[in-house]
Amino acid sequence: MSKPFNNYTHSYFAYLQIEKNSSVHTVKNYREDLEQFFMFMNEQHIEKLTDVTHQDTRLYLTKLHEKKMARASVSRKVSALRGFYRYLMRESIVDENPFLNVHRPKGARKLPSFFYEEEMNELFETVQEADELSIRNKALLEVMYGTGIRVSECAGLELKDIDFDLGVILVHGKGGNERYVPFGSFAAEAVEVYVKSSRTSLMKNTDHSILFVNFRGGPLTAGGIRHILTGLMEKASLSGKIHPHMLRHTFATHLLNNGADMRTVQELLGHASLSSTQMYTHVTKEYLQKTYMNHHPRA
C-alpha cells in the first residue's frame, strides 16, 4: 500500500472487518482497488486525498475503460472508493466525497451455468467406487449439490456443524453471518459413511475438526475442491468447464424448476437481497421454454 496513505487504509480495513463484518475476500479486493487508485493519484501528481476532484474520478474511470476492464470490476472499484471516502468523511479527514455522484456501470448479468439432472447423475456415477477418496468425493458432491453452499463455506465446515438428528448444517457465510441449511437423506448417508470410514483413514496423524480433508489428512481448501470437481467432470466426459459455483447454481435452479418459492431459495442460498436470487428466474424460464419446445405437439 502506498506509504502516504498507510495510516488511513489500515484503520479503514480494520473498520471493514470489525464494524462492517466484511469478508476476507472483500477486504483483499478493496485493498487492491485502493492501491490502484493511489497509483493513479501518483501518476496525476495528486498528493493529498483532499485534492481529488470529481473531474479526477471521471478521468480515472476513463482510464479503466481504456484498459477494457469488465463493467462489474469497474463498478466494484467505484463502490470501494466511495466507501473509503465515506469513512474518511466520518473520521473528519476529508470534507467531500468525490465519488458520491459517480455513476456505477451496471454489467449485463450473465445467466448462471448449471447442470441438468441427467448431467448430475453422470457426475454421481463417477464417485461410486469404494476407495477412500471416492467416498470423500461422493460426500463432497452430495453436500454441495444438496445444500447449495458456497465453496468457501464448504471448505470451512466442521464436524460440529453437522446435525444428523435435525438434518441441518450450520453454515458460516459471508461477513460472519450464519444460517442453518437442511440436507437430504442422500447427503446424510454419504457424509456418515465418509466420517466413519474414509475421513478417519485419511486423517492419519493429523488432528483437526474440519469436515473435508485432503489425501494427507489436512483441511481441504477451496482450490482443492475446485480441482476435485474438475476431475469428476473430466471423468464423466461432460463438456465445458466446471466451477464450484455451478453446483450452487444447479441447487437453486432445480429447486425453482420443481416449484420452490423465491424467498425460500433466497434464505437457503444466504443471499442478502432477493435481487441476487432473481437471476435464477431467467434460467428457469429458459428451461420451461426448452421443455415446452421439446415436448408439446404444437410447439
Image (tube, rainbow, N blue to C red):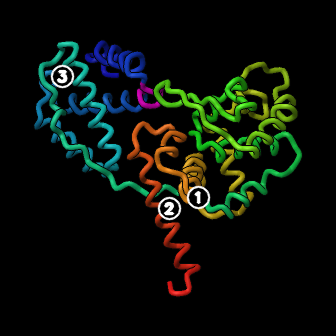
Query: Gap in Å between the C-alphas at discs 3 and 1?
Result: 53 Å
* Residue 17 vertical placement versus 36 (above, below): above
| Residue at the disc numbered 3 | 49
Q: Which of marks 3 and 1 is nearer the N terminus?
A: 3
Residue 126 left/right relative to 238? right
Residue type at mark 2: give it.
Thr
Magenta residues? 22-27
| Residue at the disc numbered 2 | 284
Main structural element of the magenta stretch: helix, strand or loop? helix
Q: Is mark 2 on a helix, strand or loop?
A: helix
Tell me the residue at 15%/37% (across/down): 101
Q: Earlier in the sequence, mark 3 or mark 2?
A: 3
| Residue at the disc numbered 1 | 258
Residue type at mark 1: give it.
Asn
Residue 13 within the magenta-colored segment of the rendering: no
Residue type at mark 3: give it.
Leu
State the image coordinates of residue 76 (x, y, percent, origin top left): 33, 39
Q: Which of marks 1 and 2 is nearer the N terminus?
A: 1
Tell me the residue at 25%/49% (across/down): 65
